[in-house]
């Protein structure tokens, strides 16, 4: 081997040794993050949030997920939360994201708040932050606030006169928080709420939708995942929403994209992606040492306008073309 080849070979060995030394350090430098969801793994809202969390944190962190499954099995939430804490103890994560209100009441508040110092970010929270004692020295995040007036306005632009609405949400702890938010925003709404409906089963929901038809010009359909049918089977929104839209026979609106795609006429939706991106970005900043007084509690601001053209045609609505500007048009998903 000549001198040039020998020198190159030595440099190659040194460089390879450096790589061997660097790789474990890089692996160790990746943060460990635990994400605890209130609902089920296949819930559309949770899927949106998870996808955005991964976009932000995948390059920097090893992500672990836990689902409390409280839409389908609320009674089992406490046991699930205990299991989530066991996972937390095993992982010893550098940061936590807790999604929606049940993850706060069942997991963060009893197990982590004022007990650990790792950064914790919440998202999708409907309750007032004071309800949970937020913010703290290591807890902040993003609140979910609905675009109610915007959805009412879009519905009115499509249908003409609209003076009253009813609001339907599955009976659960979250329904009380939503009712409180509606009461607080009452003075901001250009239509009058005539009923706040909280069915426990699909049979109840259908009967309520039929009964309120003569009173309400518009029906909000919100958080109806997990209602039971006559056989006790937990229904997904794609099973329940088309039935409710059909029974109400008048315009319906929502706060989630999936509900519009399943048959609601229109909505200005809250965006799970905004919640995922914001909470993940805030957590990354906190793990990198940004003080929490520079990471104040925030809320969602960006709404997306959606119209279901299949439902629009069924209702015989011929919109002013101006209403369609800046709107995403969707059709009923089969």
Image: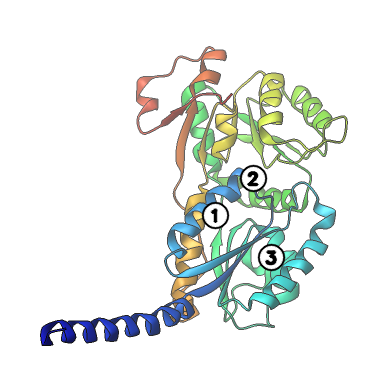
How far apart marks 3 and 2 lie (CA) works out to 18 Å
Q: Residues within 10 Å of mark 3 (few under 14, many from 20)?
A: many
Q: Are marks 1 and 2 in contact (CB under 8 Å)?
A: no
Q: Secondary structure at mark 2?
A: loop
Residue 52, relative to residue 163: is it above or below? below
Q: Is residue 291 left or right of residue 238?
A: left
Residue 232 marker: none
Mark 1, other Cα within 10 Å: few <14 / some 14–19 / many ≥20: many
Q: Which residue is mark 3?
A: 104
Q: Nearer the viewer, residue 286 or 300?
A: 286
Say which residue appears at 60% left-offset and 34% top-offset.
259
Residue 99, quarter of picture:
bottom right
Q: Nearer the viewer, mark 3 or mark 2?
A: 2
Name which residue lies at 69% across and 70% down: 108
Q: CA distance from mark 3 to mark 1?
A: 17 Å
Q: Which residue is mark 2?
A: 43
Question: Is residue 151 positioned above or below 273 on the image?
Answer: above
Is residue 122 something that shows in the picture?
A: yes
Q: Residues under labels 1 and 2: Cα distance?
A: 11 Å
Q: Does 234 appear above or below 211? A: below
Q: Earlier in the sequence, mark 1 or mark 2?
A: 2
Q: Position of residue 234 (x, y in %)?
A: 79, 38
Residue 37 on image: x %, y %: 65, 58
């Amino acid at each position: 081997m000549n001198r040039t080849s020998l020198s190159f070979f030595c440099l190659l060995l040194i460089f390879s040794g450096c790589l061997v030394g660097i790789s474990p350090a890089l692996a160790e430098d990746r943060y460990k993050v635990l994400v605890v969801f209130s609902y089920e793994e296949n819930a559309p809202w949770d899927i949106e949030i998870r996808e955005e969390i991964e976009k932000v944190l995948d390059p920097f962190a090893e992500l672990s997920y836990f689902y409390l499954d409280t839409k389908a099995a609320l009674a089992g939430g406490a046991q699930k939360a205990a299991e989530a804490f066991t996972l937390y103890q095993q992982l010893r994560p550098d940061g936590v994201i807790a999604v929606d209100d049940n993850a706060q009441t069942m997991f963060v508040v009893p197990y982590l708040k004022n007990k650990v110092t790792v950064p914790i970010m919440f998202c999708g929270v409907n309750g007032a932050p004071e309800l949970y004692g937020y913010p703290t020295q290591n807890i902040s995040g993003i609140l979910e606030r609905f675009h109610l007036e915007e959805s009412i306005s879009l519905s009115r632009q499509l249908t003409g006169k609209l003076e009253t609405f009813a609001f339907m949400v599955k009976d659960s702890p979250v329904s009380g928080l939503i009712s409180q938010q509606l009461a607080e925003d009452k003075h901001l709404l250009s239509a009058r709420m005539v009923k706040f409906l909280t069915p426990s089963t699909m049979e109840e929901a259908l009967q309520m939708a039929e009964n309120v038809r003569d009173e309400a010009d518009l029906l909000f359909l919100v958080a109806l995942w997990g209602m039971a049918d006559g056989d006790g089977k937990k229904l997904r929104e794609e099973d329940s929403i088309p039935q409710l839209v059909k029974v109400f026979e008048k315009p319906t609106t929502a706060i989630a994209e999936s509900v519009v795609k399943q048959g609601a006429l229109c909505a200005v939706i809250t965006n799970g992606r905004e919640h995922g991106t914001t909470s993940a970005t805030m957590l990354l900043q906190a793990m990198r040492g940004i003080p929490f007084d520079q990471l104040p509690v925030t809320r969602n601001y960006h709404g997306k306008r959606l119209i279901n053209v299949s439902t629009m045609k069924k209702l015989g609505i011929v919109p002013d073309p101006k209403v369609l500007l800046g709107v995403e048009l969707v059709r009923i998903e089969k």
